[in-house]
Image (tube, coloured by chain):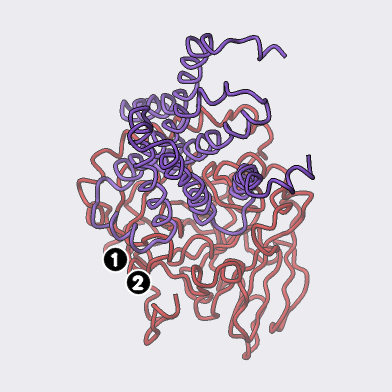
Chain colours: A purple, B red
Amino acid sequence: MAGMSITTKQLRQFGKPLVFALLMLPVLWLAWNWWLAFQYQPNGLGFNPQETSNRFSGDWALRILLLSLAITPLSKLANSPKPILFRRMIGLFAFFYVCVHITSYVWLDMLFDWTELWSDVMKRIYITVGFAAFLLLIPLAITSTNGWIKRMGAKKWQRLHQAIYVIGLLAVVHFIMMRKGFQIEPLIYAAILLVLLAFRWRKFVPNAARAAG
Amino acid sequence: MLIKHKHSWQESENSVTRESLYLNRRSLMVGAAAAGAAIAAPSVFAQRQRELAPLAARPTDFKSNESLTPENAVTQYNNFYEFGVGKGDPYENAWRLQPKPWSIRVDGLVEKPGEYALEDLIDFNALEDRIYRLRCVEAWSMVIPWIGVSLASVLKKIEPQSGAKYVRFETLADPKQMPGLRWPVLDWPYVEGLRIDEAMNDLALLAVGLYGKELPNQNGAPVRLVVPWKYGFKSIKSIVRISLTDTEPRTSWNLSAPREYGFYSNVNPEVDHPRWSQKRERRIGEFGRRETQKFNGYGELVADLYAGMDLRAKY
């Protein structure tokens, strides 16, 4: 396989900056279009820019979160540790896009109306759920460094970072609840999440997994 | 036409918008207007759009000194789930709809049931210009210049029987014309309804046009209801059936989520949607949110319909 011929060093040198640049594209698009909007210029945000902005940033937060959850299964399927090189960066990007999503909502949409925001978090279950996912992500983002892995010990650190499974579920539920009627799109994200979580369940049922293999 | 007496529903926007919220409006109005041209690839979709004939209508008291929502926003930012759940989907997909010829089935508790050609039900020589605010349940709003006739004028033609207490409306549900029907987003066909006194209220309009022309397909061609004191989803589009009933019709959104969408669904800032606040709304083209008015500002004309009713229970 061609992929196998790429060295870890090359991945660090070129692969990571490339992935970094790719993951920056959505937020750069968003920032550029908001800048245009504030300059009275034609822009891609459509007739309800706040709605577009909230949804766009939320979509990308969820996509990148799912991507981060796909790294370990990918590494196992490819029988190579190389994908793991990207896992931390992708996870931190997921957190970053959640922050963009919240900024879009709190600033551009709600204009820092804290009373309204607080009642949103308390009264609207789908916002409560999304907010809980955000809160749970914070300790994961903080402890993402090598120093913290050492300080906590690999086992404890790993257990903490398994919270991402719960966060993934909360994020998908947040998306499903936000839509009106019975809609397919959030269910596709839910299905992808369940497939990715099912990979983890294999380690709890090794016999079944072996039989299946 | 000169209006000397100013009605509360014609209130100037300055009096209902918090000043800080509309300072920035121009940026977005310009941006939004241009966005349609910039991103929706109008060359592709515009070709498929029907040629819309101009409609002659007489002016009425239903005017407004609020600025109208730009026509491209009105025709390219829509909820019409039969054509897809995205706001731009109706504009992209509604060219498949065949609004001519169009007939409407009239049945139930009426003296003159039957299959009516649209022209036999709507007097195209008596069309009226009416500017109404439209408040979507999703907390955005527009100001739209409709053309149509009062619903009451049509009901009089079909002669409701004395036992008729409700009017039930049904949207076309043809999978060949409406790709969104592939998905069970709602229990198709789309159904809406009004109490008969609401339907007879002069404010209730059957629209056949907007901005001086026939209705574009995505706005509910060839005929739609407009009940501006209720959330937008009550204003059912592309109507193929009108029935008079003695029981409250089971409406689509009410069936889908009874806690979220009541039969009445009057615009009411005091009663929140379970998932979001209804206190404020974003007028399309403005940056901030403005205060939502009870009955969307039409209380002077419709509040009496609900005298003594608990609007929290009957949301």
Decide which of B105, B80 is in the foreground and name it: B80
**Figure check: B105 above or below A190:** below
On the same chain, marks 1 and 2? The answer is: yes
Element assignment for label 1:
helix
User: Horizontal and vertical percent for residue A12?
Assistant: 48, 13
What's under tag 1, amino acid-wise? Ser
Decide which of B185, B297 is in the foreground and name it: B185
Q: Mark 1, residues whose alpha carbon is within 10 Å: few (<14), some, or many (≥20)?
A: few
**Figure check: A39 above or below A167:** above
Looking at the image, which residue is at 35% across and 48% down? A135
Q: Is residue B182 visible?
A: yes
Looking at the image, which residue is at 52% across and 14% down? A15
Residue matched to label 2: B299
**Figure check: B199 above or below B171:** below
Residue matched to label 1: B8
- Callout 2: residue from which chain? B
Decide: marks 1, 2 in contact (CB < 8 A)?
yes
User: Horizontal and vertical percent for residue B164?
Assistant: 62, 86
What's under tag 2, amino acid-wise? Gly
Looking at the image, which residue is at 51% across and 81% down? B197
Element assignment for label 2:
helix
Q: Which mark is residue B298?
A: none
In whole angstroms, how far apart are the C-alphas of marks 1 and 2?
Answer: 8 Å
Looking at the image, which residue is at 62% across and 27% down? B43
- Callout 1: residue from which chain? B
User: Horizontal and vertical percent for residue A95?
Assistant: 40, 36
Q: Earlier in the sequence, mark 1 or mark 2?
A: 1
